[in-house]
Amino acid sequence: MTAQHERRGVRDPRDALEAVALSAIELARRASARPRRISVRHGDTSVEIEWEAGEGGPAAPAPADPAVGADGDAASGHEVVRSPVVGTFYRAPEPGMKPFVEVGDAVERGQQVGIVEAMKLMNGIQSEVTGRVVEILVADATPVEYGQPLIVVAPLDVAVDRGE
């Protein structure tokens, strides 16, 4: 640790990297448009985030599941829970524990349905709607891309109308 780090209140340069990484992820989350590149530097420490973006933002990979169309949008009025960051998707809070949700489970708006680990930071993934889980598109411990569809939820009104 250098005297410069001590003056800035940083005990360990790795703490600075973690703080910078967390700031970069938070900036990406709050951005009104999908970022193509974010570069943050703290002394000798830096983090860069870059996503390929077209006019409408990064294209989600084409899912293999019929509930999500080739354009990444949900079919039949269903909502798609997407990854907010590049990382690894986990269905449960810890290995060996019960998954947050299973197909058929009822979910509330704001309920945690998964985790995406990015740069050793755990990002809780929440449902944007109240409804029922129709499909889980990504296996546990699978790498995911920014904007990639993870879970399909039938909103309460759709789930009730169709008997789902």
Image (cartoon, helix red, strand yellow):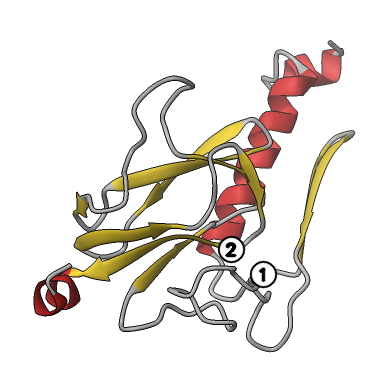
Which label is found at residue 21?
none
Q: Residue at x 65, y 79 (%)?
A: 57
Q: Residue at x 90, y 33 (%)?
A: 44
Mark 2 neighbour density, 10 Å: few (under 14) some (14–19) many (20 or more): many
Residue bearing the label numbered 2: 148
* Quadrant of the frame with the C terminus: bottom left
Is mark 1 in CB contact (under 8 Å) with mark 2?
yes
**Of marks 1 and 2, which one's residue comes earlier in the chain?**
1
Mark 1 neighbour density, 10 Å: few (under 14) some (14–19) many (20 or more): some
Amino acid type, callout 2:
Gln
Amino acid type, callout 1:
Pro
- Percent from the top left, x then y, of residue 84? 54, 57
CA gap, disc 1 and disc 2: 6 Å
Relative to 129, is 116 on the left or the right? right
Question: What element does badge 1 sit on?
Answer: loop
- Percent from the top left, x then y, of residue 64? 59, 68
Residue bearing the label numbered 1: 61
